[in-house]
Image (cartoon, rainbow, N blue to C red):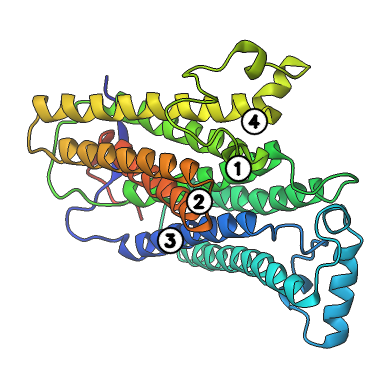
Amino acid sequence: MTLAIDRPFDSTADSHAGIRRWLWAVAALVFVMVVVGGATRLTGSGLSITEWRPVTGALPPLSDAAWALEFEKYRASPQYQLLNAGMALADFKFIYWWEWGHRQLGRFIGLVYLLGFLVVAARRLLPWPQILVLFGMGLLLGLQGAIGWIMVASGLQPGMVAVAPVKLTLHLGFAGLFFCSVIAFAIWLTPPRRQEKARAGGIAWLLLALIFVQIALGGLVAGSRAGFTFNTWPLMDGVLIPSAATLFAQTPFWENFVDNVALVQFNHRIGAYLLLALALWHAIGLRRAVPGSGEAKRATALAGITLAQAALGIVTLLLVVPLWAGLAHQALAFALLGMAVVHAMRASCRFAARVGA
C-alpha cells in the first residue's frame, strides 16, 4: 500500500532552502528541548518553579533576596514538604536552574518559530494554504507550552510530589507532534535527488505511528517511575507475563494503564517488541524487493536505530535508570521518530511540477 502526498518542486531553482533551514533549526532545538526536559525530570527539578510567568519569568533571581523568595515559594510546595524537607538553598538552586533552563529554551524555540513564520508570511514565500499550516503548527507549539504548565500545576496539588503521569505524557506527546510536523513540512519542501517509485508508504506510516505510541508509553513509564521497578529482562518478577492480579490490581480498571507500574512497564515492553518486529520485517522486505534503493536504505537505518534503542532500553532498565542512560534512551527515541518521519514522507511524496511561492 502506498500513500501519495503532492509537494511543490521548482525544477529551475530551490526556492525554499531558507525555509527548510529554519524548520530544521527549529526541529534541532525541539530535540535539545526534549533532552533537557528529560534531565529536568530525572533530576526531580520540574516542580522547583511554582509559578507560570511566560514573560517576566524569563529573568532568574538576581539577588539573595530574590533567591530567598523563590526558595520560600518552593518550600510551600508538597514536593518540598513531603520529599525534600531540609533541602539547602544550594541544592534548590541546582534544581531551579534545570527547570529555568528548560522553560527558557521553550521561550527561545517560540521566538525562533515566530520570527521565521513572520518572515514567511510577510514575504509571501509560500501560498496562503501552506502559511496557514505553519500558523497551525505555531498554535500547536503554544499549546505545548500551556500543557507544560498544566503538567507542573498537577504536581503542586496537595499530596503530590511529582507531576501526573498522563499530563507528562501529553506534554511529551505534543512535543512529538510538533517535532514531526516541522520535519514533515521541511521534507515536503525538499526537491528530490532522483525519482523513485515508493513501495511501502503505508507500512512506513504505520511504523511512524507505532513509534509515536511507544514514545507515549515511555512517557507513562517516566511519569509513574515504572522504570525503577521490575529491573530484570526478559522476565518481570520471574515470569515472562505477569499475572492478571499483578497487571490489573487497581480499581477502577482503566487506572492500571496509567498508575499500575507493572502494567505500564509491561505495555512499554510489548510495544518495543512489536515495533522492533515491524521495523525488521519492513527493512528485510524492502531490501529484497528493491535492493540498493533509497527506501531500502532508510528502512535499514530505521531498523538499526530501533534495535539500538531496544538494547539501550534494556540497559536503562537493568541499571535502574541512571541519568546518562535515561537521557540517551529519550534522545534516541526522538532521533528514531525524526528518521521515521523522513522515511514516511519520502516514501509517500509525489513531485508536482509547480512553484510553491
In 3D space, how far apart are the residues under numbered discs 2 and 4 (Cα atoms)?
Answer: 17 Å
Amino acid type assigned to the residue bearing label 1 in the image: Ala
* Of the pair 321 and 61, the residue shown nearer to us: 321
Which numbered disc, 2 or 3, marks the residue that appears first in the sequence?
A: 3
Neighbour tally class for label 3: few under 14, some 14-19, many 20 plus, Cα within 10 Å? some
Q: Nearer the viewer, mark 4 or mark 3?
A: 4
Q: Position of residue 203 (x, y in %)?
A: 31, 25
> Mark 4–mark 3 contact, CB under 8 Å?
no
Query: Residue at label 4?
Result: 261
> Mark 2–mark 3 contact, CB under 8 Å?
no
Q: Position of residue 333 (x, y in %)?
A: 43, 45
Query: Residue at label 2?
Result: 326
Query: Residue at label 1?
Result: 222
Which numbered disc, 4 or 1, marks the residue that appears first in the sequence?
A: 1
> Mark 2–mark 1 contact, CB under 8 Å?
no
Q: Residue at x 52, y 54 (%)?
A: 322
Neighbour tally class for label 1: few under 14, some 14-19, many 20 plus, Cα within 10 Å? many
